[in-house]
Image: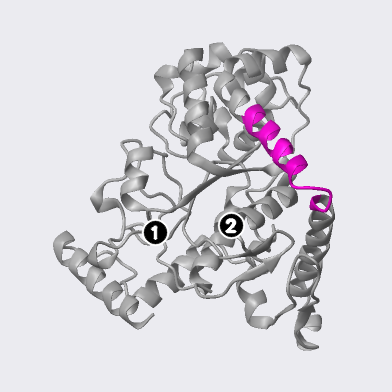
Amino acid sequence: MNNNSISNSQGTCQPHLNVAFMKIHKCGSSLISQMLLRFGYEHNLIVALPSRPGYSIIGGVGGIKDGDYVHPPGGKRWNIFVHHAFYNRTRFRQLMAPDTRYVAILREPLDRLKSAFQYFHLEKTFPGLKQKTRRRNAYVTTYLSRPSYWDPLYRDKTSFHACARNCMSRDLGLAERHYDNRTAVQEFVRGIENDFQTVLILEHLPASLVLLKRRMCWTFRDILYTSAGNARVQKYRRKARITDTMKRAFYQHNYADALLYNRFKESLQKQIRQEGPDFQEEVNHFTRVNHDVDSYCRSAKRQQGGNLVVEKSRWNEAFSLNKLFCARYAQVRRYWEKLLRSRYGLPRKKSSRKSRRKRRRSKAMSSYMSKT
């Protein structure tokens, strides 16, 4: 792929291969990370891996330390980053290739909170919240009735994954001490605007991905995605009677996330308008192609009948997909990590000696990179 130009509606361009994707909690980010892991594997790129096999995080609250990740050989830098991490501008520029483009995904903040309550059972992290919730009422409505009361009671502040307030901004590097400082929040959002070339919006995912495709000079095949087997893309199942008063209190209390989401939603809409009249046509066409691929890969009978051929259009060259693609299509992070570790010649379990482990990893990756 490195040597191949791609022709599209915007002309001829070279695909961009260095991407750091900030995996924001409960924003549909697993869909995108799986897509990018497939991209990194298929194009023989150096994908960031945690030192602990199977771990979903690289680094922690204190940032990414040298012992948190597999070190590429010879001082090389990562091409692809897709794990959970707290974004830190300085540290990521030390670890990623120099021309890396930064990508993130955001979700409507209140919908994100409802999803987090369901997935992480956040009612357990607020002492007394379950007891104060009336029978058959949703726990999230009890929280939303007084968010400024419940947040100081939150008892899982050391957790990387579970979070209730300004969680998207937190993952992108905003310190909790700045949550109530509107000047600091506005400066933070401006910094994200400067650093991130593309921010996807979950509620407009097909359009976001087509825009990403154009910005990165990728193909339809590169941005195919499925929600099959992905339990994290979900809606709140309990009936939550959320009043306008609750909404106002929530958005005021989560000023950083509200500003961040609205700013990038407006930016996405502006970029779409600037793309020209054929943009929505391409989105519609991609949606049909993605649906066809999803249907093909869910049907063993159709796969037995032969490859799926996606015909050439104004926006893509013709390509075909087979059973091997489908076998990997909906695979989650652990699957791709095992393939990558095997390709790099890395052990699946940590060695007892840190220094020896680092030397083996560096040697294995050096051997692999010399062959590619």
Q: Residue 44: name its quadrant.
A: bottom left
Dot 2 falls on a residue whose secondary structure is helix
Residue 210 location, x and y as percent?
70, 54
Q: Which residues are magenta?
A: 261-279
304 w.r.t. 362: above or below: below
Q: Is residue 351 visible?
A: no
Q: Is residue 334 visible?
A: yes
Q: Which residue is mark 2?
A: 216
Q: Residue 69: name its quadrant.
A: bottom left
Q: Which residue is mark 1?
A: 48
Q: Residue furthest front?
A: 11
For the point 42% across and 35% down, the residue is 159
Residue 255 location, x and y as percent?
58, 18
Residue 35 location, x and y as percent?
59, 61
Q: Residues within 10 Å of mark 2 (few under 14, many from 20)?
A: some
Specify whether 119 is left or right of 247. left
Dot 1 falls on a residue whose secondary structure is loop
Residue 94 location, x and y as percent?
31, 48
Indicate the amino acid at tag 1.
Answer: Ala
